[in-house]
Amino acid sequence: MRWPSFGLRPWLVGFGSLWRWRSRRRGGRPSVPLEIRRLIRDMSLANPLWGAPRIHGELLKLGIDVGQTSVAKYMARRRGGPSQGWRTFLCNHADGIVSMDLFVVPTLSFRPLYGFLVLRHRRRRIMWLGIAARPTAEWIMQQANGGLRLGGCAGLYRARSRLRLWRGLHPAASRDGHSRPTNGTAIAMAERLC
């Protein structure tokens, strides 16, 4: 870019030097030496379960005076979480998971029929299906207990919603593994069928 000849360049140089002077380092927290930064990183990589407070304490034992926030700043970042996600859990344990769902089927006379479904995730097989015009809590418990026992699903984990209705399930029928309120994919397979 060519600058005009009427003296804009000296003004820009002066403006740049002014802001360089105003943004200079005037104090604050002292900088952490490179050797200590490397030590913090190596300690965090060698001990992945240690957090910033633990590494800070170990550095204080070694006689290195550095702040805990500085330790947290220079620790190595983890790529993934410490545990598996919900999707990985479902893929790894699909042969031992059963989903249950209640659904409504509108008839031609506009009267609703209520259905109860037990779905095994291993092969996405329907293990139990019950339909009633006026279901009660007892009927639902009977369907759930019967579906889990007679459907060959006893002892498996069941994925269900957080309804109070499920509290009456027989404990020998299956182990509880309700879905999280924020995760809509827990019983998605059962809901796709409905």
Image: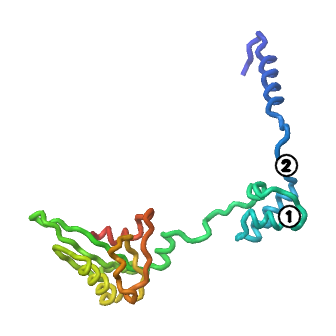
Query: Of marks 2 and 1, which one's residue comes earlier in the chain?
Result: 2
Horizontally, is 78 left or right of 95 in the view?
Answer: right
Q: Is 170 on the left or on the right of 107, as rendered?
A: right
Residue 67 position within the rendered picture, expressed as x and y whole percent measured from the top left: 80, 56
Which residue lies at the image location 67% right of the left edge and 63% below the top edge?
Answer: 78
Q: Residue furthest top?
A: 6
Alpha carbon distance from label 2 to label 1 = 17 Å
Question: How many C-alpha atoms fall within 10 Å of the one at disc 1: few (<14), some, or many (≥20)?
Answer: few
Most foreground residue, 130 or 168: 168
Of the pair 119 and 142, the residue shown nearer to us: 142
Q: How far from the left and from the top, in percent, is residue 32? A: 85, 52
Judging by the rendered image, the residue that carries numbered circle 2 is: 31
Residue 64, given in percent of the width and then of the height, sits at 88, 61
The amino acid on which the numbered mark 2 sits, given as a three-letter code, is Ser
User: Circle 2 — which element?
Assistant: loop
Indicate the secondary structure of the residue bearing disc 1: helix
Q: Residue at x 30, y 82 (%)?
A: 144
Q: Which mark is residue 60?
A: 1
Query: Which of the 4 quarters of the picture holds residue 162?
Result: bottom left
Residue 143 drawn above or below residue 193: below
Residue shown at the point (21%, 75%) measured from the top left: 135
Q: Quadrant of residue 164?
A: bottom left
